[in-house]
Image (spheres, rainbow, N blue to C red):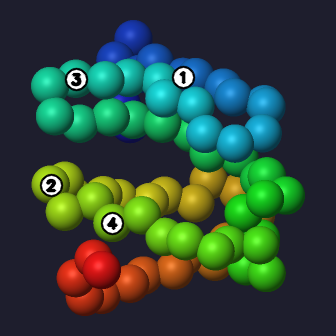
Amino acid sequence: MLPETLIEIRDHTGPDYKPLVDYQSWRVALMNYTDDLTPDKINRMQKHTETDEVFVLMAGRCILFIGEGKRP
């Protein structure tokens, strides 16, 4: 088990996205449920070609949309 002195625990109780740590070319952020991100309300997607991304579901359930191809 990892010692607690090596872990920093953060919390975000508000809606939407909140960056927590920015370091060089990577970011750690939390994202909570928000009504405007339900599948029936999404009308565009973002494509991040310069970075790798990892999504970790901490609780509940989610839908992750993955797109391929070039930007128009």
Per the model, the C-alpha gap separating discs 3 and 4 is 21 Å
User: Residue drawn 48% across and 58% down?
Assistant: 56
Q: Amino acid at mark 4?
A: Lys
Which quadrant of the figure has residue 17?
top right
In space, the residues marked 4 and 1 are separated at their CA atoms by 29 Å
Residue that extends furthest to the bottom in the rendered view of this protein: 69
The residue pinned by badge 3 equals 23
The crowd level at tag 2 (other Cα within 10 Å; few <14, some 14-19, many 20+) is few
Q: Which residue is mark 1?
A: 9
Q: Is residue 68 left or right of residue 49?
A: right
Earlier sequence position, callout 2 versus callout 3: 3
Pair 4/1: label in front: 4
**In the shown orientation, is residue 34 left or right of residue 31?**
right
Q: Which mark is residue 47?
A: 4
Earlier along the polypeptide chain: callout 4 or callout 1?
1
- Residue 16, x across and y down, in percent: 69, 42
